[in-house]
Amino acid sequence: MTQCKQLSVNINARNKVDDIVIVIGCNGLADVDNFVYCNSVINSIVDLSKAPKESRERAVTFLDNACGLFDAPCFDYNKCVNIVNFLYRQFGIIDEDGLHKIQSFIRMHKTCGIYIMLLLKEDFNEQNKDTNQQ
């Protein structure tokens, strides 16, 4: 299973929101006989640099103050679902097609355990490079 490098918690990271992506992933799933159902998956759902400035600023405040994502990933299934819904409905930084893809991902990987976290773009790209080589 690939380990995710969590966004470092400091004021500089909060000020560099153009370098941050919001990702959704699953923990993977294997049974006691080591039969692997899912080897862990991670997807970028929002590149904050591509969000409109006003929506981005409001979303960052939400992700920091309400969700605590600048401090730690969210592993709570219901909170992850609510975060996605807020990003779609309240901030408009996820479009309807993206919402449907994310909802499908959530349903498919519910038994794996899902999470949402913030990553620096370079860490996400590096991780995807490693994952695609497996």
Image (cartoon, grey):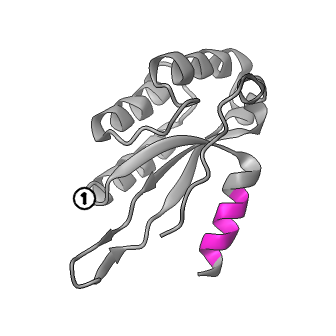
> Main SS type for the magenta part?
helix
Q: Is residue 134 above or below residue 9?
A: below
Q: Residue at x 61, y 22 (%)?
A: 60
Q: Position of residue 44 (x, y in %)?
A: 58, 49
- Numbered label tally: 1
Q: Residue at x 37, y 50 (%)?
A: 114
Is residue 63 on the magenta stretch? no
Q: Position of residue 118 (x, y in %)?
A: 59, 39
Instruction: Decide if residue 25 is on the left or right side of residue 51.
Output: left
Q: Which residues are magenta?
A: 125-132
Instruction: Decide if residue 75 is on the left or right side of residue 3.
Output: left
Q: Position of residue 92 (x, y in %)?
A: 54, 25
Instruction: Decide if residue 38 is on the left or right side of residue 71.
Output: left
Q: Is residue 21 above or below residue 51?
A: below
Quadrant where the C terminus is found in the figure: bottom right
- In the picture of the structure, the residue carrying the numbered disc 1 is 111
Q: Is residue 18 above or below residue 104?
A: above
Q: Outermost residue, left direction?
A: 32
Instruction: Decide if residue 51 is on the left or right side of residue 67.
Output: right
Front residue of 75/78: it is 75
Q: Residue at x 34, y 32 (%)?
A: 79
Front residue of 78/55: it is 78
Q: Is residue 39 above or below residue 62?
A: below
Label 1 packing within 10 angstroms: few (<14), some (14-19), many (20+)? some
Element marked by disc 1:
loop
Check disc 1 and give the amino acid type. Thr
Q: Position of residue 84 (x, y in %)?
A: 43, 34
Front residue of 40/55: it is 40
Quarter holding residue 55: top right
